[in-house]
Image (cartoon, coloured by chain):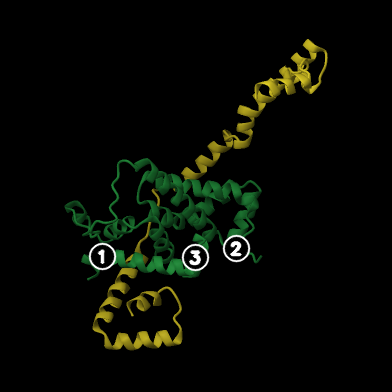
Chain colours: A green, B yellow
Amino acid sequence: MRNILEPDDRKLIEKVKKGDKVAFSQLVRRYEQTVAGVVIGMLGRCSEADDVGQEVFIRFYRALNDFRGEAGVATYLTRIAINLSLNELKRRQRRNYLFVKNNDNENPEIKDEENRQDAYDTKQAVHQALQQLNPEFRSVVVLRMLQGYSTKETAKILKLPMGTVLSRLSRAQEKLKILLKHIIE
Amino acid sequence: MLELLRRSYDATLSPGEKERLDKALEADIELQQEKKHLDKLRGLLEDERYAFDDHFADRVMERIATDEKNPSENPFLYAFKRIALPGLVAAVILFLFTVFSSGTISLDSILGVDAVQPEYVSEFLLFNY
């Protein structure tokens, strides 16, 4: 397998393997935004997002001795981040099963007054719309549209066929268009 | 054509598909409008940037340090300690008890059937079932 690590990353990883913690904190600083993009994109801005983000790096740290650099660090972290986020969403769903109603059939346009106020802030509105997608659609949007992975890379990270990714992207866009109608039209 | 337009953002269209889409875009005002909306939507999503609260790296390093001070137990080792180890201790006690009480270490004596003859079992089964 080809080693596709950035030279800087390779040096830092070698240092970490020799016990250099400062080198690991440099790696965390370098990639925390990548992980935040995935985790906050998937879970929203909440305390669990920070915990899951930390867990991503802890798993990376523990797996460093087996990490051979067949994927870049960003892709490797993204893979851990998306899996942990999906696990967290499942846990959340189980926890809230009895208390949260399924709103799949409701008109998804952002309507209530509080949300309308927030929608003045475009970024907030986009974030809210993203959180209203089902996790399976959200994950493809986060990887493809927010993180900028190609469709092929997205399929590989999520272990899905390309056709499934394309159809989920198409359906997600359709829903986002409705949710963000007041901004994009 | 709408589906083709959406797909054009995420997949490589064949030359034929591309030509069909280009022609439709030239002629169809609704499709042009749709493309404009999709461009805007994707632009908004690309601009989304998220960050953890300040000092995230410090929190990660703190957790690593804590984990190293109090390493969490391997789940298999935990299961072994909680289930297999007491079972092993019980088996050893039973074995020693059998050895001291009957003076033998046969399986029959461990199972407590050393005084039962095979004929008794077959007779019992024959007359009762």
Up the image or down, A134 lies above or below B65; here it is below
Q: Residue at x 22, y 55 (%)?
A: A118
* Element carrying mark 1: helix
The image shows residue B106 at horizontal and vertical percentages of: 81, 21
Q: Mark 1 lies on which chain?
A: A
| Chain where mark 3 sits | A
The answer to which of B28 and A5 lies nearer the viewer is B28
Q: How far apart are marks 1 and 2 (CA)?
A: 40 Å
Using the image, tell me which numbered label, if any, was put on residue A52. Answer: none
| Marking on residue A178 | 1
* Disc on the earlier residue, 1 or 3: 3
Label 3, residues with CA under 10 Å away: few <14, some 14-19, many ≥20: many
Let me know if residue B55 appears in the view: no
Give the residue displayed 40% in from the left and 68% down from the top. Answer: A167
Q: Which amino acid does label 1 sit on?
A: Ile
Q: Does B110 sit above or below residue A47?
A: above
Mark 2 sits on what residue? A5
* Circle 3: residue type: Ala
**A24 sits to left or right of B117:** left
Q: Do the residues labelled 1 and 2 touch (CB within 8 Å)?
A: no
Q: Name the residue under label 3.
A: A155
Which of the two residues, A56 or A24, is positioned nearer the viewer here?
Answer: A56
Classify B26 as above or below A99.
below
x and y, in percent, of residue A29 in the image: 49, 53
* Quadrant of the snapshot with the C terminus of chain B: top right
Q: Which amino acid does label 2 sit on?
A: Leu
Q: What element carries label 3?
A: helix
Q: How crowded is mark 1: few (under 14 residues within 10 Å), some or many (20 or more)?
A: some
In the rendered view, tell whether residue B16 sits above or below residue A139.
below
> Which class describes the residues within 10 Å of circle 2: few (<14), some (14-19), or many (20+)?
some
